[in-house]
Amino acid sequence: MDIQVTFVSVNQRGQPQRDQRRVSGTSFTVGRGSQCQIHLPDARVALNHAHIVVSETGAVIDAEPGRIQINGRESEGARLAAGDRIDIGPYTIQVDAAPPARPLALTVTLSSPRSRSVTRLVPRVLQRLPDLSKRRLSYLAFGGVLLIFLFLPILPDLLQGKPLPVRDSRRVMLNEVIPAVAGGFTQTWSPGPLSRSHQVFGHECRACHAFPFVQVRDLSCVACHKTIKEHVPAAELTGPRGVAFADTRCAECHRDHKGMQMTPRSEEQCADCHRDVKGAAPNARSENVTDFARDHPRFRLSLLDADHPKSIRRVRQATPPSAEMVEHSNLKFNHALHLDPGGVRDPEGRRDPAGMRDPQGRRTVLRCADCHQPDADGRLMVPISMERHCRQCHSLAFEPEVTKRQVPHGSEKEIVTMLREFYARLVLGDMPPDVNPPHDLPRMRPGAVLSYEERQRALKIADGKARQVLRELFETREVCSTCHDVSRKEDGAGWEVAPVRIAQVWMPQAVFAHAKHSTQACVTCHNVRNSKDAGDIAMPDIAKCRECHVGARPVRNKVTSDCATCHGFHAGRDYWLGTLQAQMQPRGAK
Amino acid sequence: MRQHQSILEYKNGRYLKLALGLCALAIGAYFWQEPPTVYLKPYGGTELGYTLGIVGAVLILWLMLLGIRKRRYRSATGSLQGWTSAHVYIGTSLLVIVTLHTAFEFGWNVHTAAYVLMLLVIVSGFIGVYAYLRYPALMTANLGEEQVETIVQKIADLDRKCRRMALDLSDPVNAIVMKASRAGVREPRVRTSFRRRLAGDKVRCPTREACGALTRVGAKFTGEQAKLNQQLLTAMTQKSVMLDQLRRDRRYRAILEIWLVAHVPLSFALLAALIAHVVSVFYYW
């Protein structure tokens, strides 16, 4: 069965054109799909918009609700009769009176063609977000970040204080304001806070970073840290590790921009070499160690010898102590006697701990602190001195029955001069009020005028008296020899007092602060209550330290102590700067 | 033909595995290689720090190449889908690699600025992935078999039809329809347009308001007038529905576009910060 479909279109001159077709079948699809029998090529028409079914009884159209209008009214389906008008999107389909042998005749007209103004709207609807060009924003972001984080920070360094290459106008603006502002941006390059002591020149990057694109060099460090020393004496910097170690930059260990502290402390780092120190550097003279609690060797004491002042003996502590563990100070001293709980004889009377004197009492109990006082920084003890610590009891009175005057301590020559002048004055009749006239000296009659000969004779007598008193001091009366080895010189002209040297530091390689140990009594570590000889050494053993101190691994109720608790790294004798300069000298120049 | 495959599932997550491998490698190296240097906490300047930094920088440069690759339609170096999949996963792996490079050291400086920019780029990228996974489906569901062009045409037709129908009705009705008609698809100032687009159908719609007004006015009509008014209301409602459809479509398009407006310029800011970071580190080494 064929139906007749007439498409009416408008040609270029605006005249209607009719295109009549025969379409065969009984069921017809109307839509914009090309497979549709009644093809309506417009986007406003659905793919399969409506169906027309033709049968013996007539034609019926149906479509989804809201899609078609029949005679101006919405419809889902209807029986078609001649004169009906169907609106499908922009098309109008007129049902014509059917010609013979055709069950249905339709005229299709595009009643509302696409308007050009509406077509122009479409791109605007689909338009991208206006004025937000990704490209322009990208250029802006890239340039802005480069300006803030690269150009401005680097500008002061590139200028190096020179003016910007511009004309003179606006000079202040360009040459002062911009570099000052840019200097602030330089701080954005700092990766972290500087150590406390470096903050003072923190704005001056070149102070340490001397050359662009070159790592910080040791020369920058020793420019200020001139007195920093090598780790060990240069002679011991041997072996694979030792030599490599000499090439290590300061900054390998001391990294700045890491906060307040830039001093590394680490047990493992020391143990790296010191667990096999001879393997690391064959000339090393220390013993292996990894941890204070575990395997620290016993202490080596540095002992002086008063008769050989240039030599230092390093003797390791042992049980029983080695025969070498004796101090040769040339001094006689008995700690046991001085620390007698019953006290010592005190010629000026008893003293109580507050220093008050009681002339009736004759014995004073001495405490360690009466002689051993800490120095200003609380680390060591102030050296013992005759004047301050001994003389109160050990008087150097040369003739106690005659006068309380004392000879000076130290020089035989000064003593001789002093004695000769003293006795000459007595002999010549000038008797000071604090002197009882001695019986064995001739006395002048008051008002007598002496002849030259008489004066010479009198002075001779005074000299003889001085010599006699001197001999008593050095030999017979045990004044000097109480503490010193005194011997008569071989030529007989005077006496010789053996030189005295007392060690101040027995363990120079360890840092020890007495002030930090003030909770302990002196005798806890230095037990001298029974020491009768000045040669005795009362330095504590490592076992004594370990009563309180453990190694790097914390232990309950103990003091955690890593290597750096007692030892400094830069402990060598040679200056780091010196080694650097030696390295920088051209080959063969040495 | 294979079903559509999202970039996340590309080749069975090949690049996901690659990225996870990279992260695992970086984390492993961080925890196994750093302990020997106990005296210094890990930081960007150790050997591993430099390595992670170089890897991160190279990856960032490579990720930025996607912008070039996607414009080279004739290029045969991998499929664009593969590139995008790798871009997403490798880009995400930077979160681990670069964070380890920083060794968790942050401050007010160019270094942290570069890091923060990288985080912003990655976060905007996440928004993009979310948008690409979610909105194309919503767009299809919204438009159905329609196209923007046809909707615009239909709205114009309905508009014309409504105006014609309103001619037969009273003056107030005519005024209501004319008012809705004038407020077509307009493109006002940037910011407003921006907000209006992202608001989608949650905006004041003159047509929707006109429908309400017509209902109120129409209640008084009787007979033929009421019937005409009812037809007009139907057409206006259709127009309102289509307008909302169009607005939703524009909203989806805007979202699909806006993350990239952040992502791309931020990437270039990151590239600049990266250059400044590297130069600053080695200038004052």
Image (cartoon, coloured by chain):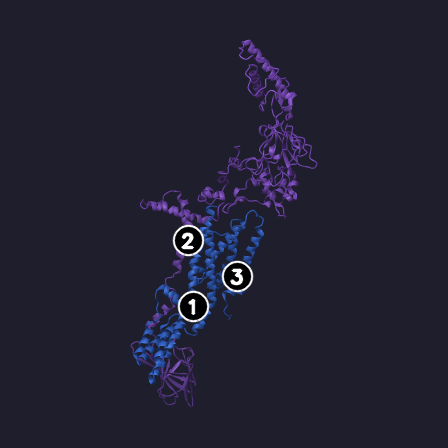
Horizontally, residue A192 falls left or right of residue A464, namely left
* Numbered circle sitting on residue A402: none
Q: Nearer the viewer, residue A328 or A517?
A: A517
Mark 1 → mark 2, Cα distance in angstroms: 31 Å
Q: Position of residue B248 (x, y in %)?
A: 41, 70
Residue at 42% x, 77% y is A47
Question: Based on the displayed image, in which of its 4 quarters is residue A127 positioned?
Answer: bottom left
- Choose mark 3 or mark 1, whichever is in front: 1
Q: A242 above or below B211?
A: above
Check if mark 3's residue and mark 2's residue have beta carbons within 8 Å: no
Q: In this rendering, is residue A429 above or below A165? A: above
- Disc 3 marks which residue? B15
Kindly identify the amino acid type of the residue bearing the numbered disc 1.
Tyr
Q: Position of residue B172 (x, y in %)?
A: 31, 78
- Chain B shade: blue
In the picture, residue A416 is in which quadrant?
A: top right
Left or right position of A250 against B74:
right
Local SS, label 3 = helix
Residue A484 in picture, x, y percent from top left = 63, 25
Disc 3, disc 1: CB below 8 Å? no
Mark positioned earlier in the residue sequence (3 or 1): 3
* Mark 2: secondary structure: helix
Q: Chain of mark 3?
A: B
Residue at 56% from the left image edge and 57% from the top image edge:
B24
Q: Which chain, by letter, is purple?
A: A
Residue at mark 3 shares a chain with residue at mark 1: yes
Label pair 1/2, CB-CB below 8 angstroms: no
Mark 3 Cα shell of 10 Å, populated few (<14), some (14-19), many (≥20): many
Say which residue label 2 marks: A145
Give how far apart the Cα atoms at labels 3 and 2 are. Answer: 31 Å
Q: Which residue has dot 1 on it?
A: B252
